[in-house]
Image: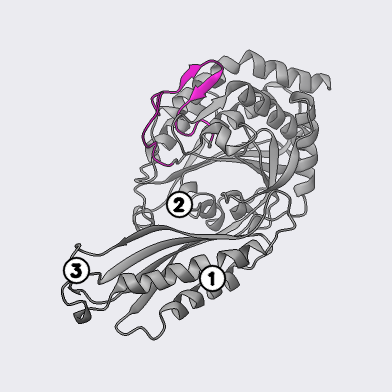
């Protein structure tokens, strides 16, 4: 290890208790999405980084746009750290919005309790932890006092759970940023270079209500919805035959995650709403898949008297694919992880989807890397007692700081 990187690691060790304290502050301001009132957390983060002499630009998405999107407030932050000319701009992106905590917690979900080497709380592992990772990696880099070239940006955004379109998507579309490389929130023991695309549809099946004693007077929307359900689930064996060439990604998936409908036990259902999710491997073309899914749904109920459909797209997120330059991020992260973690970490795909794809859609090489365990289940992410091993936070901060030095030093 070079003496400069030794200094980085030493600074992080000396300030690690402070880093944990910052993560506790980040966890204690709720950002449940829904409802998605996330501007207060952004305000807190902006005030927090003032202590380091940084200025956080607040980019509030217009209120009506946010309401139409299904949330209450979104303020995205950009912290810009310009250095000398002649180097790239590297952005670090983590999201602050979270799914609601739910039940069965042993620890308070917004307590930031530290016990037996773990910190507990909603978003401890996904991904408020990487607010701390990225802030302290940047502070360590700047504390070296060595000449730096290029620039560093911290992107703290607040709608990953809704698809990211008003988070990184908004910042990019408004031309508020165009970095050369991006590292987005991830886990310490693998680098994600590709992920699935996702299509979500809301299918409204309209029929006509009727008395349960005279069902022939109505048109049963649930009976029609059942045909759609059968069409969807009959397709699953065919989807399993489609295989991705990318390690870590298997086959496309499809499911119905929610069903609402009917008015009472003794009434023919006049309306049923299905919400479905179709994950696409990176090799699939989302526009073609959406057309196929829509045709499958329409064909399932074609010719049924008194039945009509409304199909509304809720989300169409594209896949993250490797870009020219991705290999440079991977090589640096792997080299530094070998130093600080002591093993070769893999670069592979994931069946999940994340905000990083939005940078990729603009031709920016992006990978997911940050603080966390080897697998999502180990972290209890999106479940009770979500937690982060503090040693993983320490290691990831060192790896990211050293990688920033590789690109900007």
Mark 1 or 2, closer to the camera = 1
Q: 131 or 211: which is nearer to us? A: 211
Marks 1 and 2 close (CB-CB < 8 Å): no
| Residue range corresponding to the magenta coloring | 99-125
- Up-down: is 215 above or below 390? below
Mark 3 or 1, closer to the camera = 3
Q: Is residue 106 magenta?
A: yes
Q: Which mark is residue 162?
A: 2
- Up-down: is 308 above or below 265? below
Q: Which residue is mark 3?
A: 267
x, y percentage for residue 126? Answer: 53, 37
Q: Quick one: SS at disc 2? A: helix
Q: Is residue 7 magenta?
A: no
x, y percentage for residue 227? Answer: 41, 73
Query: Which of the marked residues, 3 or 2, is nearer the chain's N terminus?
Result: 2
Marks 3 and 1 close (CB-CB < 8 Å): no
Q: Is residue 186 left or right of residue 231?
A: right
Q: Quick one: SS at disc 1? A: helix
Q: Which residue is mark 1?
A: 290
Name which quarter of the figure residue 303 lies in: bottom left
The furthest residue to the right: 2
Can you say which quadrant of the picture contains the C terminus? top right
Q: Quick one: SS at disc 3? A: strand
x, y percentage for residue 306? Answer: 29, 83
Q: 151 or 317: which is nearer to us? A: 317
Q: Real-space Cα distance between discs 3 and 1?
A: 33 Å
Dot 3: within a 10 Å radius of its alpha carbon, few (fewer than 14), some, or many (20 or more) residues?
A: some
- Which residue is located at x 72 percent, y 34 percent? 404
Query: Which of the marked residues, 3 or 1, is nearer the chain's N terminus?
Result: 3
Q: Is residue 34 left or right of residue 180?
A: left
Query: Which of the marked residues, 1 or 2, is nearer the chain's N terminus?
Result: 2
């Amino acid at each position: 290890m070079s003496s400069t990187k030794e200094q980085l690691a030493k600074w992080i060790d000396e300030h690690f208790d402070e880093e944990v304290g910052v993560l506790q502050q980040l966890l204690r301001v709720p950002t449940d999405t829904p409802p998605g009132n996330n501007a207060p957390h952004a305000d807190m983060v902006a005030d927090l980084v003032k202590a380091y002499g940084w200025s956080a630009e607040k980019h509030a998405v217009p209120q009506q746009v946010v309401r139409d999107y299904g949330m209450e407030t979104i303020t995205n932050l950009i912290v810009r750290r310009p250095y000398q000319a002649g180097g790239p701009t590297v952005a670090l992106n983590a999201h602050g919005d979270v799914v609601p905590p739910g039940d069965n917690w042993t620890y308070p979900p917004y307590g930031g309790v530290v016990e037996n080497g773990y910190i507990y709380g909603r978003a401890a592992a996904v991904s408020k932890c990487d607010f701390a990772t990225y802030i302290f990696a940047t502070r360590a880099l700047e504390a070296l006092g060595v000449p730096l070239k290029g620039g560093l940006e911290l992107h703290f955004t607040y709608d990953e759970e809704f698809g990211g379109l008003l988070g990184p998507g908004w910042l990019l579309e408004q031309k508020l940023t165009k970095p050369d490389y991006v590292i987005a929130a991830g886990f310490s023991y693998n680098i994600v270079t590709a992920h699935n695309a996702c299509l979500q549809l809301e299918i409204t099946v309209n029929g006509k209500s009727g008395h349960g004693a005279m069902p022939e007077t109505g048109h049963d929307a649930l009976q029609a919805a059942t045909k759609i359900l059968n069409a969807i689930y009959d397709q699953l064996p065919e989807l399993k035959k489609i295989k991705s060439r990318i390690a870590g990604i298997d086959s496309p998936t499809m499911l119905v995650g929610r069903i609402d409908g009917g008015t009472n036990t003794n009434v023919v259902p006049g309306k049923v709403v299905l919400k479905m999710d179709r994950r696409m491997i990176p090799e699939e073309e989302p526009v073609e898949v959406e057309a196929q899914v829509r045709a499958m749904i329409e064909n399932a109920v074609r010719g049924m008297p008194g039945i009509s459909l409304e199909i509304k797209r809720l989300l169409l997120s594209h896949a993250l694919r490797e870009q020219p330059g991705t290999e440079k991020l991977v090589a640096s992260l792997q080299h530094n992880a070998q130093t600080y973690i002591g093993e070769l970490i893999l670069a592979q795909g994931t069946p999940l989807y994340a905000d990083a794809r939005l940078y990729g859609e603009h031709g920016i090489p992006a990978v997911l890397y940050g603080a966390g365990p080897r697998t999502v289940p180990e972290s209890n992410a999106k479940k009770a007692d979500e937690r982060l091993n503090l040693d993983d936070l320490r290691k990831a901060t060192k790896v990211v700081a050293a990688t920033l030095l590789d690109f900007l030093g």
